[in-house]
Amino acid sequence: MERSPSSVGGNENLNNETLSKLSKKAREYIIRMVYEAKSGHPGGSLSIIDILIYLYYNEMNIDPTNQNYEDRDRLIMSKGHASPALYTTLALRGFFPQELLMGFRKINSKLEGHVHRGVPGVETSTGSLGQGLGIGLGMALAGRLDHRNYRVFVILGDGEIEEGNVWETLMGANKYKVSNLIAILDRNRVQLDDMTENVMPMGDIASKVRSFGWDTMEFNGHDFNEIRKAFEFANQKRDGPVFLIANTIKGKGVSYMENTAKYHGSPPANQEEFEKAIKEIRDL
Amino acid sequence: MVSESLREKYGEMLVELGAKHPEIVVLDADLSSSTKTQAFGKKFPDRFFNMGISEQSMVTAAAGLALSGKKAFVSTFAVFLTRTYEQIRQSVCYNNIDVKFVVTHPGITVGEDGATHQIIEDTGIMCGLPNMRVIVPADSIEVSSVMHHLVEKTKTPYYVRLSREKFPVVNDSDYKFREGRNTVLRDGSDLTIFSNGAMVGLALQAAEELKAQAIDAAVINVSSMKPLDRENIVKYAKSTGHIVTAEEHSIFNGLGSRVAEVVSEEYPVHVYRIGMRDTFGKSGKSWELFDYFHMGVKDIVEAGIKCFQKEDDYEAVS
């Protein structure tokens, strides 16, 4: 089955310039949300945001005015700490009002610290790492059983794939040859404590995943031309699942947050840092 | 009393209900010939997923299927399901979705396979999960009725604890499981024995023997461990004044604990708990193990008699 995007749902096909503007806006929201909440995970949100913007505007068959239609593409943010990135993308795309974003992590808000299914557009709660790919496999199997056309996108962190649950599911998805399952690895090379290679050497992830029976492709997760090519690759006719490895930069767009574990789970430390982050994002 | 297999009944019911309910899917982890989900797999191969010895993948895939409108039955041995506690917590219970964990081979009735396989803490673990409901059927008739209940009336997470052994049939053939309602299998005025699962048959035998000691014991099946029938427990605490609990499980965080919580809050009476006393099991014939761990008919009878000895004579265990 050719998995080209259908005309159902809202596929905007925006050009790179417009996508970049949206990404900048989203980056600013991410910083504002975690600064307002005085907590949260900016680093891994800034590394995945360009891909999320591309997916929700150009790739996925979704409809913010009919959010639960059966044939919609599903996205699972398995690295559930990147909630600022997902919530921001959903709000920009019209799933819920942007004003709600500043309620992030507050007691009277639905915007839980980690991705929560009560938020419009969210398919499953996540936050404990390693579980989203399995959930994606289940959704892909259900889609096949129901003869539906939808695709399931699962975003994984590179620290996250140290979890055994991921590798169990890499086996299972190969067994069931789910060609409607697309995993995207946010390969930003940093996890909470340190660089991933210091915490747990992952070696050649692409060849490991290929040996589990998946097709793989590596691309620059901040370049919209490369992102476009990656999803064109994912959409080629094939017999099994696809694992896209997005080479990204942790904290991308804010100089002092880039390539460091310090801002994996910490907001700007003070007003000065906050203003510097906003200025740098606006100057991107 | 005639004995019947609970897991065989589960397998039959999956096939029967599966024919009427296309939304049912079944997942197993290389134990389908033991859990008896295999028959469903043969009849409905497209809706059966043998995930291999990969319980984490099995539970998360079940969550994904349920999030897509399926009713997912997940089966393996009880002890192996608990390795996915966190997947059950995060992906199933927090999402509050239609996944039914129906496990076999819990407790000491596993027998010869020994302590590694005899989980005695599982219902405590599962009762602690928000949104999870917990059922411990006493016989094959109850399994049948529970399956109808799960398929026809529910869309949230359940944990159902079956067994390896056959259990004596204690319910009437027209028995209907009612969630949150105990079943009085034998009424009595002096003492109440609350039990479930494997222990119900033993409790009924113990009640017969207590009758010879002029103690009139009620026997109540608490198959619905969560929600619990608080009203019935309080009613019998008041009417009999003495309680013995009997469970094939640790006395910690199990049926005894739950009953004690209720009476402590509402009508304190003495509760004597029969169960595994902070110990692992061991290999042996399953019915020998009940005596070995002081959970046999004789032990239930002794607990019942102790209720009527002077308080000074009562020797608390644990």
Image: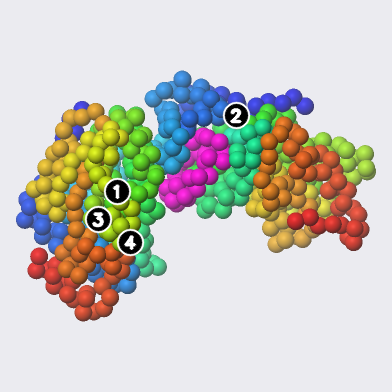
Residue topped by disc 3: A189
Please identify, in this view, whether the residue under mark 2 or under mark 1 is nearer the observer. 1
SS label for mark 3: loop
**What chain is tagged by disc 4?**
A
The magenta-colored residue range is B74-103
Please identify, in this view, whether the residue under mark 4 or under mark 1 is nearer the observer. 1
SS label for mark 2: helix
Q: Amino acid at mark 1?
A: Met
Residue topped by disc 4: A192
Q: Residue at x 27, y 47 (%)?
A: A203
Whether pointer 4 and pointer 3 mark residues with C-beta atoms closer than 8 Å, the reply is: no
Front residue of A200/A85: it is A200
Q: Amino acid at mark 2?
A: Arg
Front residue of B98/A253: it is A253
Marks 4/1: CA–CA distance: 15 Å
Residue topped by disc 2: B7
How packed is label 1: few (under 14 Cα within 10 Å), some, or many (20 or more)? some
Marks 2/1: CA–CA distance: 42 Å
